[in-house]
Amino acid sequence: MTTGKIPLAGVIGSPVAHSKSPVVHNYWLKKYGLPGHYMHLDIAQDDLRDVLRMMPRMGFVGANVTIPHKETVLQIADVVSDRAALIGAANTLIFRADGKIHADNTDGYGFIENLRANAVWSPDAGPAAVFGAGGAARAVIASLLDAGVPEVRLTNRTRNRADGLKAEFGSKINVFEWVQAGSMLEGAATVVNTTSLGMVGKSEFRVPLGGLEPSAVVSDLVYVPLETDFLAAARARGCQVVDGLGMLLFQAVPGFERWFGQRPEVDEALRQAVLTS
């Protein structure tokens, strides 16, 4: 910011044209009257290291990272936050004044802030039930445990991936077979789908929800469609439901603040800007 250059940032992935991150960050830049640009950056895996090292010299102050680079950037970064190391992936890079690349993961922050903003939610209300054991699940589980959830019940279509997360995260993780996933909902205060089931173009979410407590807070990381069949079924049972769009918006807050020097607000106008883009 002190060089007189217009600060640049972007989202790195391949493919990446589908990403809504430019809508989010450019909305904030305009709202707060800040100099800067945020753009899509389709970077091939073989070029990633060279591009990242060049970006600060081009005026970039940071970047978001999406598939397939979220794990690879940890090997390139000079400094890795504890959160990113625990999750095994980074979604936010800060190009520091000393030339070093700092890698962080704000997905878990975005998930928790989305719950708190859109539901009456208490982490100590009871166990959490999590569907899926991929990268998003890692961020969700880490954030739930950090917030104080007493137990995480976990299921995945491939059992060994769930067992792997239990081995990493410890005794508060209890693994359920996918065919018995419905039984882990009984008494669960927080229920989260981290899989792509129910997304447009993907298979349906077919787990029976008869054990779902009406007092539960139910979240789906999918946001296309905004209200999945899973959330609609939970709403019909009386649950508080939280869609996945808010996680996308809230995870962007820490990066924007670091890059552009302004802590942005997530509001309804921003949601509508993203939904209509």
Image (cartoon, rainbow, N blue to C red):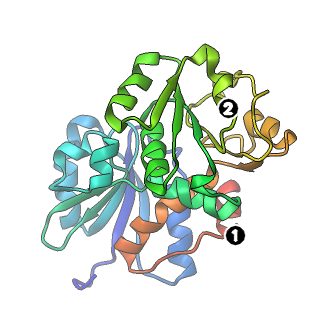
Where residue 112 sits, quadrant-wise, is bottom right
Q: Does the rendering let one see residue 277?
A: no
Q: Position of residue 154 (x, y in %)?
A: 52, 30
Which residue is found at the position 81% from the left and 39% from the top? Answer: 232
Q: Earlier in the sequence, mark 1 or mark 2?
A: 2
Which residue is found at the position 43% from the left and 69% from the top? Answer: 256
Q: Is residue 94 left or right of residue 206?
A: left
Query: Where residue 269 is drawn, which disc sits there?
Result: 1
* Kind of residue sitting beneath label 2: Leu
User: CB of mark 1 within 8 Å of CB of mark 2?
Assistant: no
Which residue is found at the position 42% from the left and 46% from the top? Answer: 142
Vertical comparison of 146 with 7: above or below: above
Which residue is tagged 2? Answer: 185
Vertical comparison of 74 with 167: above or below: below
Dot 1, crowdedness within 10 Å: few (<14), some or many (≥20)?
few
Q: Is residue 62 left or right of residue 124?
A: left
Which residue is found at the position 15% from the left and 63% from the top? Answer: 100
Q: Secondary structure at mark 2?
A: helix
Q: Position of residue 83 (x, y in %)?
A: 33, 53
